[in-house]
Image (tube, grey):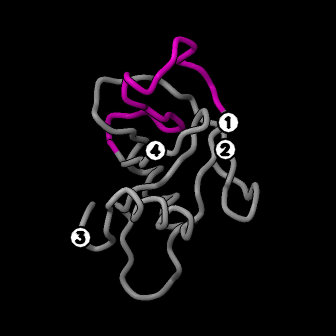
Amino acid sequence: MFERFSSGYYLGELYVEPHGGERAVIQRADHEHVNEQLYADGEGVERLDAPLVMKVDGGHIPVGGDDDVPSGTLAIPQELADETLPDRRNVLLADADRAEKLLRWEGWEPFVNA
């Protein structure tokens, strides 16, 4: 789904569509798989529900998992969508270190927030 793009990001292509929710989401199984493959370090018990951080059209957004979203789709809140959506888009996924820094900057704390 994603391949290494740079020292801080992976690159993937997703179908991006607006939705009526308050947060960006991908299919829960995809979310857990990406968390496990790219964010987990293999040490002890690890969270697979921590937000992913994706960069779409120049902005970083935390992304959760949702069973109602089709696999390979990123559903973003309507207010973040532009008139060209829905469409396939290149999406950058922050690696674990960068994602944690971006989330902490926004006030998210591991093991406290989900």
Residue identified by numbered label 3: 112
Residue identified by numbered label 4: 61
Q: CA distance from mark 2 to mark 4?
A: 15 Å
Residue at 42 percent of width and 47 percent of height: 63
Query: Residue 21 is drawn in which quadrant?
Result: top left
Disc 2 crowd, CA 10 A, few/some/many (<14, 14-19, 20+) = some
The residue nearer to you, when weighing 11 against 59, is: 59
Residue identified by numbered label 1: 90
Q: Are marks 2 and 1 in contact (CB under 8 Å)?
A: yes
* Image coordinates for residue 89, horizontal then vertical, percent: 64, 30
Residue at 36 percent of width and 48 percent of height: 65
Query: Residue 56 is drawn in which quadrant?
Result: top right
Residue identified by numbered label 2: 12
Disc 1 crowd, CA 10 A, few/some/many (<14, 14-19, 20+) = some
Q: Which residues are magenta?
A: 66-89
Residue at 66 percent of width and 57 percent of height: 9
